[in-house]
Amino acid sequence: MAVAATVSLIAAGTSAAGAAPATTGPTTEYTVLLEEPGNRDFAIDAVEAAGGEVVRSNDAVGLLTVKAPANGFAEKVSASSAIVGAARTKPIGHAPAAEKTKRDNVEKENKGEKPNKAPAQQGTTAGMDPLDGDLWGLNLVRSNIARAKQAGDKRVYVGVLDTGVDGSHPDIAPNFNNELSRNFTVDIPNDSDGGVFDGPCEFRGCVDPANWDDGGHGTHVAGTIGAAANGFGISGVAPGVSLVNIRGGQDAGSFFLQPVVDAITYGADIGLDVINMSFYVDPWYMNCANDPTASVEEQLEQRTIIATVQRALNYAHRKGVTLIGAGGNNHEDLGKPRQDTVSPNYPPGHNRPRPVDNATCLNLPTEGNHVISVSALGPSTNKADYSNYGVEQTALSAPGGYFRDGLGTPWYRTNENMILSTYPRNVALVEGAIDEAGNITEAGLAAGVKKAVQGDKVGYYQYLQGTSMAAPHAAGVAALIVSQYGKKDRKNPGLTLSPDKVEKVLYKTATQRACPNPRTVSYVNVGRSPEFDATCEGDAKFNGFYGHGIVDAYGAVTRGRQFL
């Protein structure tokens, strides 16, 4: 589904009585989208007339960051013909603890109970890193044999738009480009009500370094894409490419509009070849252009998010970036979405049941323009119970982990059904997976946390699952395609290949997988409610569970040229 980059807004400049709304209350920040990027002067006039002050701008997509009164500004400024809309840039209320818990319940499902002990594993394949024997996903996408042909070129740059990347991790450091990496977020220690959001600021100015990750999610993603094949720990799908941190996520795991858009446009401007996006833009799981439950300001916010993200994605695509998105963990057909009950995810307690109109509601960025949306599989290649699906959005499938895979076998409910990847030491310590001395705790051992030591090098690794883990497998294969078939970029350092060509090779070389028989899969036997039941539509060439198929690194680098 798609919504045009510029949407028609409701008549927001008047109240029910017809008078312009008053701008009152404490000052807060807004993201304001221009109708046309070139109309900046007219837009600034409108901002100032509405009581706002421009703080900075993103000229690539026509975006202004504005300080303005908390009440009435969005409605008043949106009445201008030079403005598409406005959205608050920061949350009001406490940290979205319930939303973070909901995400952790999926991605860290193994930590909610005592996992079963997995059968003994086979040894690592010759030429692979010591822990690669635990990476069933690496084998499923055939990266283990693709690297003999193409392991990834250092001139190919993959952006990780996430919670940050631990650039000091021994498996990340050899491929991490610190010079290009940027952090577009500012930590939010406390909210307006005195509650904790991101936690205390560890660094001056509340801005983490570009090689830092307090969440762990981004480092896990980065390791799957491009952990170095260096005889230590694990290796990634494309172990020879360059990793660039373009951080747009808060420590708390929230992804707000302004940092996300700034990260996308920056990545496009510096010549990134691939950007991985394993998140959705907060606070709306679904951004709806015609939300009947929304206040005027909430409606403006959702429409502004839709228009802004679409404009940024279009910009990146024009600049040659292949965009990979996680399909989402809400176990629903995105073409037939259920009622949205989690939005808005802050302030706490403000979420409400909302009808979702498939024609005008979008889960962003995965349902945005030019984004290759990826569903998640377990080691059996069954669709993971939590994974979104559907013929409307699922383009590809990839290993994302499935804790409950293998019912009736010794693998059922084991850590090893999930995805093992890099884990920042600072996060492992805070989460209690290791102690101050760096030893794995009982809780860490139960969750399958691993430690690699080589001389003075020490690295940690954790198991997670989710479409967030599936997307980087596809991003790694995309990077291998650019490495194998790309040409020298005349505008930026490195190689380049049209994202449309990368997409075609991904689709044409994916391993086709037909729908299961019967087509409707019930997850009741593994402890899920009937709400998780999923019906696969389509044929072996394209269907709602697997899209065009399971991403295949070996096929991409050996057969891809015929499709260019």
Image (cartoon, rainbow, N blue to C red):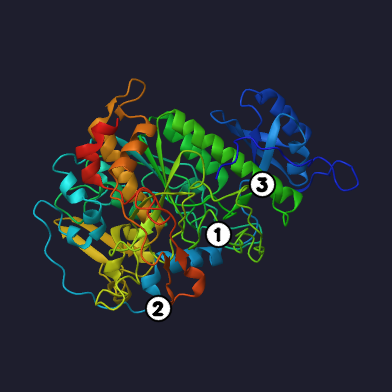
Q: Which residue is mark 3?
A: 289
Image coordinates for residue 146, horizontal then vertical, percent? 18, 45
Q: CA distance from mark 3 to mark 1?
A: 28 Å
Query: Which callout, 3 or 1, points at the residue further toward the start of the chain?
Result: 1
Residue 197 - label: 1
- Is 67 located above or below residue 137 in the figure? above
Residue 22 - label: none
Q: CA distance from mark 2 to mark 1?
A: 38 Å
Which secondary structure, mark 2? helix
Residue 402 occupies quadrant: bottom left
Which secondary structure, mark 1? loop
In front: mark 2 or mark 1? Answer: 2
Direction right: furthest residue: 17
Where the N terminus falls, by quadrant? top right
Q: Which residue is mark 2?
A: 525
Image coordinates for residue 304, horizontal then vertical, percent? 64, 42
Number of residues whose C-alpha sits closer than 10 Å to that of mark 3, classed few (under 14), some (14–19) or many (20 or more): many
Residue 20 occupies quadrant: top right
Number of residues whose C-alpha sits closer than 10 Å to that of mark 2, classed few (under 14), some (14–19) or many (20 or more): few
In front: mark 3 or mark 2? Answer: 2
Query: Which callout, 2 or 1, points at the residue further toward the start of the chain?
Result: 1
Image coordinates for residue 457, horizontal then vertical, percent? 19, 55
Number of residues whose C-alpha sits closer than 10 Å to that of mark 1, classed few (under 14), some (14–19) or many (20 or more): many
Residue type highlighted by circle 1: Phe
Q: Is residue 453 left or right of residue 515?
A: left
Residue type highlighted by circle 2: Asn
> Which residue appears at 56% of the width and 28% of the height?
59
Where the C terminus falls, by quadrant? top left
> Which residue appears at 13% of the width and 56% of the height?
455
Is residue 28 visible from the viewing direction of this image?
Answer: no
